[in-house]
Image: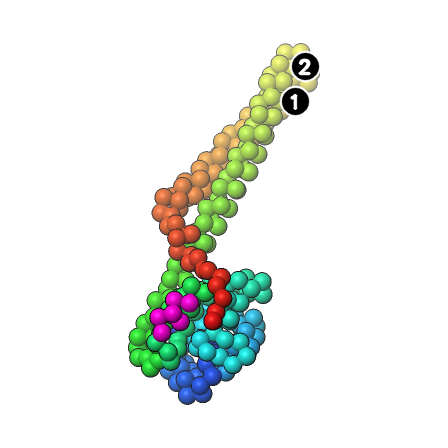
């Protein structure tokens, strides 16, 4: 069993009971969590409520076809949060036109029945790994954005406060000879300001690792747009 399988949810949509039972048993034994749908409408309902990690989808389904369902997932407003879900489409027809149409609509893979389960499983795991990679890159890019935003904001605060403290220190030093009995107070204030400036320098040193982390993450960047597949919104025949 793959240690990651138990965390993955797979929706199987097919109008053949034997196919549903086969995949439900085989994938369940491997640790996947599965749900089944016998028509496209039921599959759409489960997609919205259950939000699986991958869908196995027959292209010919009652009520809503596999092509229509794929189009809805990729471009429908109700599925924006799972629009990138991997779709493995399968069919009893080994027709090139059907394969091209399914892939252009947004299917990630297309398998012709009868199929070999080991091959299907390998393709499922490959697609799930790719999706996980994209997720890792998206999280890394978000960390870069947050690191840069925090560093910029703190740096702006440090500079602004530093300029104010330097101005106050200069004014306190200028008042010192004229303050008479207030001299000790002004001198104490000047020392406090000097300590505050030193603390700001320490804060600035804390910012540097954040900036360096963002830069290092950028150096290891993978072009995310290249990993996200562009889908054509074409009509199914």
Position of residue 46 measured from the top left corner of the image (x, y, whole percent)? 54, 75
Mark 1 lies on a secondary structure that is: helix
- The mark nearer the N terminus, 2 or 1, is 2
Q: Position of residue 162 (x, y in %)?
A: 56, 28
Residue at 45% x, 54% y: name it: 138
* Quadrant hosting residue 212: top left
Indicate whether 220 appears above or below 187. Answer: below
* Numbered label attached to residue 211: none
Looking at the image, which residue is at 49% across and 31% down?
A: 201
The residue at the point 45 percent across, 49 percent down is: 141
Q: Which residue is mark 1?
A: 185
Range of residues picked out in magenta: 95-101
Residue 99, magenta (yes or no) = yes
**Disc marking residue 179:** 2
Reply above or below: 77 against 11: above
Q: Is mark 2 in CB contact (under 8 Å) with mark 1?
A: yes
């Amino acid at each position: 069993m793959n240690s990651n399988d138990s965390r993955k949810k797979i929706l199987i949509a097919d109008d053949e009971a034997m196919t549903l039972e086969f995949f439900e048993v085989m994938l369940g034994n491997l640790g996947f969590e599965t749900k089944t749908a016998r028509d496209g409408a039921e599959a759409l309902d489960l997609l919205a409520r259950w939000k699986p990690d991958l869908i196995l989808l027959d292209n010919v389904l009652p009520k809503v076809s596999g092509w229509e369902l794929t189009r809805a997932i990729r471009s429908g407003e109700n599925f924006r949060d799972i629009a990138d879900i991997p779709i493995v489409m399968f069919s009893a027809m080994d027709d090139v036109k059907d394969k091209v149409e399914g892939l252009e609509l947004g299917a990630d893979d297309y398998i012709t029945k009868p199929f070999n389960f080991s091959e299907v499983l390998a393709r499922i795991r490959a697609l799930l790994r790719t999706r996980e990679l994209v997720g890792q890159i998206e999280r890394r890019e978000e960390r870069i954005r947050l690191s840069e935003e925090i560093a910029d904001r703190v740096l702006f605060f440090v500079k602004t406060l530093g300029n104010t403290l330097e101005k106050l220190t200069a004014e306190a030093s200028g008042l010192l000879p004229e303050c008479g009995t207030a001299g000790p107070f002004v001198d104490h204030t000047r020392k406090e300001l000097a300590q505050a400036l030193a603390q700001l320098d320490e804060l600035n040193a804390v910012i540097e690792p954040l900036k360096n982390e963002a830069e290092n993450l950028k150096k290891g960047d993978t072009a995310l747009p290249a990993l996200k597949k562009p889908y054509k919104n074409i009509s199914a025949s």
